[in-house]
Image: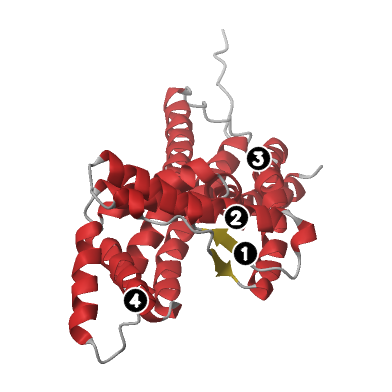
Amino acid sequence: MAPRLRSGLSAVLISLACLLAPCGTLAGWVAYGLADTGRYVEAMAPLADHPDVRDTVADSLGAGVADEVAAGPGNGAVRLFVRDAARSFARTEAFRVGWDAANRAVHVAVLHALRDDGARGRPVTVDLAPVTARVRERLAADHVSFARRIPVRHTAVTVLPAHEVDRLRKGYHVLDVAAFWLPLAAVVFALGGIAVAACRRHALTAAGIGTALGGALLALAVVLGRRLTVADLPGPVDGPAAGAVYDALTETLRTASWLLVALGLTVALTSWLTTRLLHRRRPPTPPAPDPTAPGPTRTRL
């Protein structure tokens, strides 16, 4: 194969590999990060102590309790009392237990709906009875007098409507398959591009730079995604609380994007330094003899 053709094929393969690397990282984050209940709950657990998230959840909880006791909009004193009580509860260990239990229950329900094709046309609902039971146990362990009188009722709360579940299910199946094949394809294309290159060290340097650029673009996409996501959220979940949740969920994705940058730059720099070192150690090539130059003169005896 001609060197020019080999260089062109190598450039195409390396370009595909550099494009697939950040896409595969994103798909892997969804399939193996967000879709893992244990990792999801672990990522969300510290938010129970985040002031913005804690106050937002407490205000929503207080508003629901106020509606349950029939405190009308005009009864501001009762609503204020309930809100203060909810914010005080949000600073207890029982709230942290309930927060973890609620996140686990919601994640399990959503994940089951996304993976079950037979659940089409049905919304995602969560039974709050196990969460209430966990909170009651925690309050009883803290010797709260009224803890045993808290009723545990099976209340189904809709998390996602049916049309949203059907839309997300298609995207989840695509990402679940892509999480395995995209990284594998990126590695195969990169190795193939380096193997067919006319100068493999130059191809390796290009692959490293392309990988670093892909990681940087992925990190930029995470930042832009935060702005778009937080701006589109309605009502009480808008603002700093939503930003804190987004940051907690995308922490591993940000780390993975910067690892791509570091890996690409390390490969490119190592290849470049190796090339320079080999050029320095190579002995200089003697100049070729000039055929037009006169030959040595002979002395006649």
Residue lying at 58% horizontally and 29% vertically, measured from the top left: 289
The residue pinned by badge 3 equals 187
Query: How far apart are the two marked residues, 4 and 2, measured between alpha carbons?
Result: 29 Å
Q: As shown in the figure, which amino acid type bears the numbered disc 3? A: Val
Mark 4 or mark 2, earlier in chain: 4
Whether 215 is drawn above or below 170: the answer is: above
Residues 224 and 186: in front is 224
Horizontal arrangement in the rendering, residue 117 relative to residue 96 (left or right): right
Do labels 1 and 2 touch, CB within 8 Å?
Answer: yes
Kindly identify the residue that appears in the image at 23 percent across and 50 percent down: 92
Name the disc covering residue 132, or none.
Answer: none
Specify the label residue 69 is tagged with.
4
- Of the 4 image quadrants, the one containing the N terminus is top right
Q: Residues within 10 Å of mark 3 (few under 14, many from 20)?
A: some
Query: What is the number of the mark on residue 124?
Result: 1
As measured in the structure, the alpha-carbon distance from the residue carrying label 4 to the one carrying label 3 is: 60 Å
Residue at position x 52%, y 56% in the image: 106
Residue sticking out furthest to the front: 149
User: Counting other residues with Cα less than 10 Å from the Cα at mark 1, is it few (<14), some (14-19), or many (20 or more)?
Assistant: many
User: Mark 2 or mark 3: which comes first in sequence?
Assistant: 2
Percent position of residue 264, x then y:
48, 43
Residue that mark 2 sits on: 109
What residue appears at the point 40 percent right and 48 percent down from the top-left corner?
100
User: What's the distance in space between the residues labelled 4 and 1, CA to CA?
Assistant: 27 Å
Of pointers 4 and 3, the one earlier in the residue sequence: 4
Viewer-nearest of labels 1 and 3? 1
Asked whether residue 215 appears in the rendered view, the answer is no
Three-letter code for the amino acid on which mark 1 is drawn: Val
